[in-house]
Image (tube, helix red, strand yellow):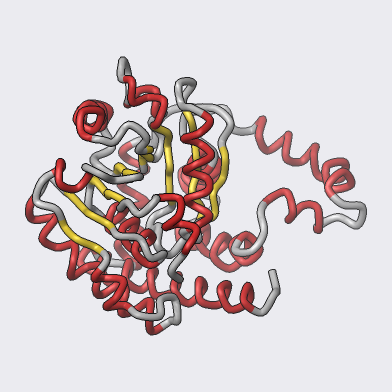
Amino acid sequence: MASLAARQLLKGRHVAVVGAGLVGAGWAIVFARAGLEVRVFDANPDTAAGVPDFIRVQLEQMQHHGLVDDAPAVLQRIRVSADLAHAVRGAGYVQESVLERVDVKLGLMRQLQELLDPDAVVGSSTSGIGSSKLTQGLDLATRVLVVHPVNPPHLVPVVELVPSPATGAAACDFAHALMLAVDQSPVRVNREIEGFVLNRLQGVLLREAWALVADGVATCEDIDKTVRDGLGWRWSFMGPFETIDLNAPGGVADYAARLGPLYQSIAASRSQDEQWPPELVGRVEAERRRYLSQDELGQRRDWRDRRLMAIAASRRSRKEDGKA
C-alpha cells in the first residue's frame, strides 16, 4: 500500500506522531503502511515502550487479512523517539494524539511552534475540542487543524478535518490530500462546532439509547441488537441520507413527506438535557457486565479489531474489483 503521492506530499520528510496511546499507535500504522517514515513520541516512557509490540501484533493480524503486504517492512518504518525534539524536527506533518485536555494540548502546541519547520502542518486527533482553543496566541495556528479519526484509525478510514478561523487554506488542502494519499476517507467540516460531525451524530443516538433504558422501554442488549442487527447493516455501507432516499418509492422527498411528521413527533417527545445520571449509568454498567466482564474488555476489543479487519479486507477487495 506504499503511496508515491504521500511521499511526494511530504517531500522526503517524515511524519511525527505525538502521543502513543491506542489512537496514536494506530496513526503510526496508517502512515507507515503508506510508505512513510514515522517517528513516535510519548511523554510516558512505559507507553512508548509498548508501542513496537502493539504495532507488531496489529500488523501481523492485518497481513493475515490481506491489509498489508509486508508487516515487518511496515514496522521498520516506525521508530520510537526518546524526546519530542527528535520526533518532530524535520517532520512535514505532525499528528497530535495526546491527552484530551486543552491545557495539555496547548502546552504541546507551544513546544511545537519552537521546534517545527515553518511549513509543517499539525493535525490534532481531538474528539471535540476546536483547534482555536489549542493554538491561542500562537503563530502556529495557521498550520493547525483538527484531524479527528475513528478509533482505531488504521482499521476505520473516516477522518474529520476541522479548521479553526485561523487555519490557512493551504494547511486544509494539504491535510485533505495527505489523508487521501494514506488511504483514509477525509470529511471536510466547514467550521468549528462542538463534537464536529461524527460525535454529534453519535451523540443523538446515544441520547435516545440512554433515554430508552431509563424509561424501561428496552434493555441495553436489545437496543444494541437493534443497531447491530438492524440499522448497522445498512449503515456499514451507506449513510442516513442515502438510506432514506432508498426507503421510499419516490426518494428522499417522498420519505420526508411520509415520515417527517413521525420524526418531528419523536424529537418533540425528548426535552431532557441533563447529563446521564449516575443511577442510570450504574444500571447500564451492571447490565453490560452481565454480558461482558471487566476482565474481558481487552479480549473483546481484540475481537472487535479482527472483525474490523475482515470488513476492511472485504471493502478493499470490492474496491479492487471495481465495485462500490
Left or right of 156, for residue 46: left
Q: Is residue 169 left or right of residue 96?
A: right
Closer to the camera in the image, 299 or 90:
90
Q: Height in image: 2 above or below 193?
A: below
Above or below — where is 145 with respect to 315? above
Look at 29% across and 52% down and name the residue there.
Answer: 24
Q: Does residue 66 sit above or below 193 in this rendering? A: below
* Residue 204 visible to an observer of this rendering: no
Residue 262 pos. (x, y %): 76, 41
The one of 133 and 110 positioned closer to us in this rendering: 110
Q: Position of residue 60 (x, y in %)?
A: 30, 79
Residue drawn 21% across the image and 42% down it: 89
Percent position of residue 134, x then y: 32, 26
Q: How many marks?
A: 0
Query: Residue pushed farthest top?
Result: 137
Residue shown at 35%/44% (left/top)? Answer: 93
In-front residue for pair 69/324: 69
